Image: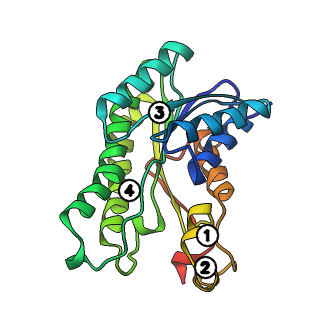
């Protein structure tokens, strides 16, 4: 028995990395998970992995830049499962590392479209279903760059600061109807994407910047998300919970 038995959850950007880890962890704790990703085959693979190990998951191809696609995703989930209890708004991208004056309008807009608008469109679709169901827990994927800055990362930093502000506003707006909204702030996380993008020297240098001596893992983030999804965090809303191995306190 898990502490999320029978809860209905949607995880966006769940085809790989942190999102996939969140989907697996929620399912491991008993949730029924909709694995959503813009990459349909990736979402299908994660859902199949979950079901093959005894969990309950289905997949959906959804582009978080499309508000009506998110409305359709939530409507289908409620139609098939009866309600929506948990939403992990994880879909996002990293921007090309450039100083702000060198960012093209296209790069700037793409980052904000996915990282800010995607979270807004997701919550806009999820919250009405949670109100009808009597409440729920929303976890938005922020970053340590929701509260600090990093060189040559203006678009990403701006987007993740915005996610934190949006989270706090939504928490105030919907606390009275039983919806909790929190943000998670991972530090550098050792995903396949990060490991493949960095040389071993740069990877090790970044890992050494974390006081605990390593980067976080997707599972580190997923366990925090699962805690915020559960009743164990019933008194937490509007929070910004960091999981960064001490990176942001140096």
Question: Residue 203 got which mark?
Answer: 2
Question: Disc 3 on helix, strand or loop?
Answer: strand
Q: CA distance from mark 4 to mark 1?
A: 27 Å
Relative side of 246 to 116, left or right: right
> How many C-alpha atoms fall within 10 Å of the one at disc 1: few (<14), some, or many (≥20)?
few
Mark 4 and mark 3: Cα distance apart in space: 26 Å
Label 3 Cα crowd, 10 Å radius (few <14 / some 14-19 / many 20+): many
How far across and down, in percent of the image, does residue 108 sit? 25, 63
Q: Residue at x 60, y 75 (%)?
A: 246
Tell me how far mark 4 sits from mark 2, CA to CA. Answer: 27 Å
- Label whose residue precedes the other's in the sequence (1 or 3): 3
Q: Residue at x 28, y 50 (%)?
A: 113
Q: For mark 3, what is the residue?
A: 61
Rounded to the nearest angstrom, the CA distance separating label 2 from label 3 is: 32 Å
Tell me, for residue 195, which label it has, or none: 1
* Disc 4, SS: helix
Q: Is the C terminus in the top left, top right, bottom left or bottom right quadrant?
A: bottom right
Task: Tell me the distance, in whole angstroms, between the alpha carbons under discs 2 and 1.
Answer: 7 Å
User: Can residue 101 be seen here?
Assistant: yes
Q: Earlier in the sequence, mark 4 or mark 1?
A: 4
Q: In the rendered image, which residue does mark 4 sit on?
A: 164
- The answer to whether residue 188 is seen in the rendering is no
Labels 2 & 1 near each other (Cβ < 8 A): yes
Of the two numbered discs 4 and 2 in the rendering, the one whose residue sits closer to the viewer: 2
Q: Nearer the viewer, mark 4 or mark 3?
A: 3
């Amino acid at each position: 028995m898990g502490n999320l038995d029978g809860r209905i959850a949607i995880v966006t950007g769940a085809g790989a990395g942190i999102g996939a880890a969140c989907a697996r962890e929620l399912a491991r704790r008993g949730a029924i998970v909709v694995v959503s990703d813009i990459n349909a085959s990736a979402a299908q693979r994660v859902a199949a992995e979950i079901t093959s190990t005894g969990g309950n998951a289905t997949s959906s191809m959804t582009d978080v830049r499309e508000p009506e696609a998110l409305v359709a995703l939530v409507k289908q989930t409620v139609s098939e499962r009866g309600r929506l209890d948990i939403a992990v708004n994880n879909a996002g991208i990293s921007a090309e590392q450039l100083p702000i004056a060198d960012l093209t309008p296209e790069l700037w807009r793409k980052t904000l479209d996915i990282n800010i608008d995607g979270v807004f469109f997701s919550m806009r679709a999820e919250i009405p279903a949670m109100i009808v169901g009597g409440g729920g827990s929303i976890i938005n994927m922020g970053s340590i760059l929701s509260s600090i800055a990093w060189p040559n990362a203006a678009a990403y930093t701006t987007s993740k600061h915005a996610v934190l502000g949006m989270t706090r506003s939504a928490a105030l707006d919907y606390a009275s109807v039983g919806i909790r909204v929190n943000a998670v702030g991972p530090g550098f996380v050792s995903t396949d994407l990060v490991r493949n993008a960095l040389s071993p020297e740069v990877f090790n240098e970044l890992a050494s910047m974390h006081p605990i001596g390593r980067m976080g893992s997707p599972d580190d983030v997923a366990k925090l998300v699962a805690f915020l999804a559960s009743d164990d965090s019933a008194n937490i809303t509007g929070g910004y919970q960091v999981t960064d191995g001490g990176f942001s306190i140096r």
